[in-house]
Image (tube, rainbow, N blue to C red):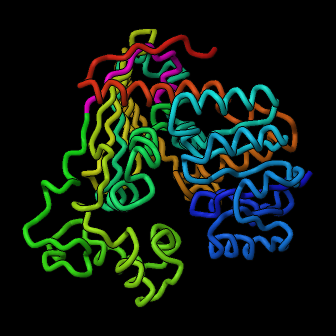
Amino acid sequence: MTVTLAVVGAGNRGSTYAGWALHHPDKARVVAVADPRATHRAALADAHAVAASGLFDSWQTLAAQPRLADAVVLATPDREHAEAATRLADLGYHILLEKPIAPTETECEAVTAAAERTGVLLAVCHVLRYTRYTDAVKRYVDAGALGRVIGVEHLEPVGWWHFAHSYVRGNWRRADDSSSSLLAKCCHDLDWLRYVVGDTPTRVSSVGALHHFHPGNRPRGAADRCLDCRVESSCPYSATRFYRACLADPSRREWPLSVVTRDLTADGLDAALRDGPYGRCVYAGGNDVADHQSVTVSFAGGATATLTMSAFTPGGHRRTRIMGTHGYLEGDGEQVTVTDFVTGATVDTDTRGGGADAGSGHGGGDMALMAGFVEAIATGDRSRIRSGPRESLDSHRMAFAAERSRLAGGVPVPLGPTSP
């Protein structure tokens, strides 16, 4: 069976997931694209040879038609997720939904209810569950190599340039337009912690703030745009320096540069930096989401886990330490090292191998998720998806609780009953 796909949202994430079909044309085929941006819509349609009859200028226009594909890849802006997912589920589309499910807890509950009511497959893009690295960590924990898990330290090093790109200048710069930075960036980190620990979270507390990217830290003499700024050359967050370097690097043209402009020339880039959001001074952009935040999760069995999300790092893989009664695990997203407390010996596991997709987005998680989603539809085996709607909802509730705690000054927030 070749699974047919409609892609709703032809930006970076939608195009990434759709790209799996180009490498597996016998298993999946894109037959429709919906996006209000004509250039994005046309670029994705051309890549997949989608007929003109399969092009739509919005998800609403697509949803006004009878169902024309087996499944939809839903990668619209966060604020559109709930209404679109509910309507498309009612039409019978299976849904691959980019995280987060939605920006509010009520909307997340509505999407989950729609999937359960209609019986469609809803796979939220918790891509971290699908990597070889995660498989190795989970295998050690489940096999008892660490004994009882007592504590976990988990770091999401967003990266100074990535945070400036996505959360100061980009689509996730304001909570009222998208969501909190924790939900947008780390709902799948919280999901990963729950998955790896294998226990029910009972309480969440969090502290954090917008520490740096605000007018109070604006350098003397800084302009509203980097192209006009006389102190730009000494600024770590110079859009001019960063995006011009991306233009010279083919590996960074698809992302992040294609988000800034589709005209990948020097003149095209300068025009985008002159007029668009990605050329703004990071201290004058009106952003309001936290740039550094720590979350502590308590689990029913007594373990605790801390997650730190920070803009003030180099970019890179997540880093994790797991402390158990019989062993200790340390991982950097590629290598896992386990210390046995009985023998004192260490064992290293390198997870970087494993085929053509192993080095793709999120350590291979993007493509492995897509493979599981397509296979689940083709075979009816829903176990190929590693988190169902109710479990994904529970992981999002951890993020909402953490944000309530942060805004209340770190007050612990108990979590209600979670799904089995």
| Quarter of the image where one finds residue 229 | bottom left
Q: Which residues are magenta?
A: 193-207
Q: Position of residue 241 (x, y in %)?
A: 28, 77
In this view, the residue in front, 79 or 192, is: 79
Q: Please, is residue 244 above or below residue 62 in the view? A: below
Q: Please, is residue 223 above or below residue 320 in the view? A: below
- Name the residue furthest left: 220
Q: Position of residue 197 (x, y in %)?
A: 48, 22
Left or right, residue 212 beside residue 43: left
Q: How many marks?
A: 0
Q: Residue at x 41, y 89 (%)?
A: 266
Q: Position of residue 79 (x, y in %)?
A: 55, 46
| Quarter of the image where one finds residue 380 | top right
Q: Please, is residue 82 above or below residue 27 in the view? A: above
Q: Residue at x 45, y 9 (%)?
A: 301
Q: Residue at x 71, y 55 (%)?
A: 59
As for residue 200 lying within the magenta part, the answer is yes
In this view, the residue in front, 325 or 398, is: 398
Q: Position of residue 373 (x, y in %)?
A: 74, 44
Left or right, residue 101 beside residue 332: right
Left or right, residue 123 beside residue 193: right
Left or right, residue 405 beside residue 170: left
As for residue 205 lying within the magenta part, the answer is yes
Q: Is residue 298 visible?
A: yes
In this view, the residue in front, 25 or 119, is: 119
Q: Is residue 324 visible?
A: no
